[in-house]
Amino acid sequence: MAKGLQRRRQGINLLSGPGLSFLRVCDTFNRTIIRTMKGFVEGWVMKAITANELKTRGVASIDAALKDQDEAFISVRGKDCYVVMDVETYNRLRVCELEAALYQARQEIADGKAVEESVEEHIERIKKL
């Protein structure tokens, strides 16, 4: 059995190994993709809040839009311009972004693309760019 599966079954944090954070990121991406595709099949469309509605109803319009879904558009003059989401959704997306960056950095180190140098050497190298 793979190390990652053993750790997952034992309840150990998935961030403990170099490739394990990638599994967590993929799992989150897969759940998001499945949820989105299921929504398209069922005819789900992300709720849009007009700028005028937001102006008149305020936060209540956002609360109503987020009641049944994770995100909602804010449209200005008929064009979707912004997306609002609750803090839990934002934090989940932020964790995914950070874990993906960590995975990418570990891959670059494994591929020998990293540079090990002192602060002074680093500053000098950046000045030359």
Image (cartoon, helix red, strand yellow):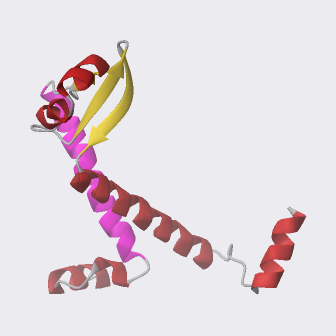
**x 75%, y 83%: residue:** 119
The location of residue 47, given as percent across then percent down, is 20, 27
The location of residue 30, given as percent across then percent down, is 27, 52
- Pick the quarter of the image with the N terminus: bottom left
Residue in front for this viewpoint, 99 or 26: 99
- Pick the quarter of the image with the C terminus: bottom right
Residue in front for this viewpoint, 77 or 69: 77
Q: Spot the residue most to the top.
A: 77
Above-or-below relation of 51 to 101: above
Above-or-below relation of 125 to 6: above
Q: Spot the residue most to the right.
A: 128
Q: Main secondary structure of the magenta part?
A: helix
Q: Which residues are magenta?
A: 19-42
Position of 71 with respect to 117 (left or right) is: left
Residue in front for this viewpoint, 95 or 109: 95
**x 35%, y 84%: residue:** 16
Above-or-below relation of 48 to 78: below
Position of 128 with respect to 102 (left or right) is: right
Above-or-below relation of 76 to 35: above
**x 35%, y 78%: residue:** 15
Residue 99 included in the magenta stretch of the image: no
The number of discs equals 0
Give the quadrant of residue 20: bottom left
The location of residue 128, given as percent across then percent down, is 89, 65
Give the quadrant of residue 67: top left
Residue in front for this viewpoint, 15 or 79: 79
**x 17%, y 83%: residue:** 11
Residue 41 included in the magenta stretch of the image: yes
